[in-house]
Image: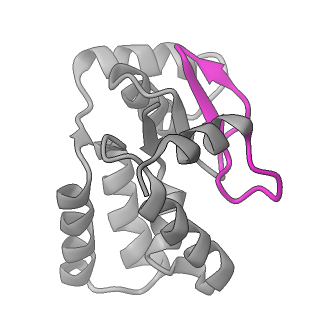
Amino acid sequence: MKAALDTNFLAYAEGVNSDAEKRKRAWELLEKLPEDAIIPVQALGELFQVLVRKAGRTPADARIAVSGWSYAFPVVETSSSVLLAAVDLATRQFSIWDAVILSAAAEAGCQLLLSEDMQEGFVWRGVTIVNPFAQTVHPLLDALLGSAPE
């Protein structure tokens, strides 16, 4: 099973909002995720903005963080097919930027999108949105972590 990481997941891993529990949970999950987890390029762009505007990092420091994530996981670009699918999704339910992330996850063959901000349990093109910080672990996330090598 393959997963994509949303901006908020990365932001918590970076320590944004000083939520120690969520940062710890993000890193616990990162250690257990299979190696084929991906990051949509849109999430990296949003992370840069969050690190500069919300966390008060310098653009140079935010760049280092974004570069680190891009080396740690494959990055899925926003192709024209990803964008067109996202526009279709955005006309029905999501903001365009969330739709781009979800569409990129689908294009990459992911079954899960780990996101605190999107509608948990929503399924689109085979991708299920799962809140990795929920009190009860979603069965698909449990299955993903159970199949990850120790």
Outermost residue toward the right in this view:
136
Instruction: Pick the residue in front: 1 or 60.
Output: 1
Q: Residue at left 23%, top 24%? A: 79
* Numbered label tally: 0
Q: Is residue 1 above or below residue 136?
A: above
Q: Residue at left 31%, top 40%? A: 36
Residue 2 visible at all:
yes
Q: Is residue 65 left or right of residue 107?
A: left
Q: Is residue 108 above or below residue 146?
A: above
Q: Is residue 27 above or below residue 80?
A: below
Quadrant placement of the C terminus = bottom left
Q: Is residue 127 left or right of residue 85?
A: right
Q: Is residue 19 left or right of residue 74?
A: right
Give the residues drawn in magenta, as a range. Answer: 117-138
Instruction: Pick the residue in front: 12 or 136.
Output: 136
Q: Is residue 88 left or right of residue 18?
A: left
Is residue 123 located in the magenta-colored stretch of the structure?
Answer: yes
Q: Residue at left 44%, top 69%? A: 50
- Measured from the top left, where is residue 53 in percent x and y? 43, 76
- Measured from the top left, where is residue 95 in percent x and y? 57, 35
Q: Main secondary structure of the magenta part?
A: loop
Instruction: Pick the residue in front: 73 or 146.
Output: 146
Q: Picture quarter containing residue 128?
A: top right
Is residue 122 located in the magenta-colored stretch of the structure?
Answer: yes
